[in-house]
Amino acid sequence: MDERFAVVASAGSFLAQDGAEDGDDVRLPHRWTPGGVGVRSAFTGGHVLNLAVAACVLNDLYREAEAAGVELLGVRVRAEGGFDTSRWRSTGISYAVEVDSDAPRALVEALIAAVDEAAEIPRALRQGAAVTRAAD
């Protein structure tokens, strides 16, 4: 059985627009946006794993946009993934990005593509990672 876990991270012009996903809204401070980041997520392991992807992509979009001199008015990243609950194995995570910017669309698309390659959490998950319990 595949159970799905959906989350949203948003900032800027998308903060007031977010629709219903799993869980509740939380506002967190964010170094690149004066209004902070809005997060809609339940607090389960599946949700938090997917939120790590959404948060990393959102952060990296702002970081790379600043470095490129591109003003972002808002960013929304929806991430969703599933787990085969018979084995608790991830069935994968997908994410979608919406960007509000006055920059040319081709420049925004190039920024999104660059972040897809550079974002640390998605890169780490794509490679696989050992998870071990530390000794007491």
Image (cartoon, helix red, strand yellow):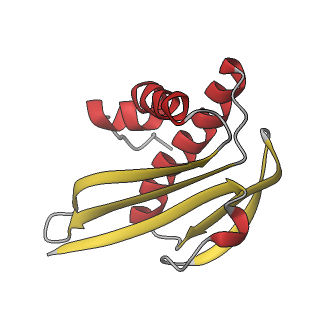
Res. 111 visible in picture? yes
Number of numbered markers: 0
Where residue 11 appears, as percent x and y from the top left, is 69, 54
Q: Quadrant of residue 32?
A: top right
Residue under the point 27% across and 64% down: 82
Specify the quadrant that holds the N terminus: bottom left
Foreground residue among 66 and 55: 66
Foreground residue among 88 and 82: 82
Where residue 112 appears, as percent x and y from the top left, is 48, 34
Where residue 12 appears, as percent x and y from the top left, is 74, 54
Residue under the point 52% across and 36% down: 105
Residue under the point 75% across and 57% down: 28
Where residue 54 appears, as percent x and y from the top left, is 50, 50
Foreground residue among 134 and 6: 6
Residue 10 in the figure: left or right of residue 118 = right
Q: Is residue 29 above or below residue 20?
A: above
Residue 101 in the figure: left or right of residue 32 = left
Residue 57 in the figure: left or right of residue 92 = right
Q: Quadrant of residue 64?
A: top right
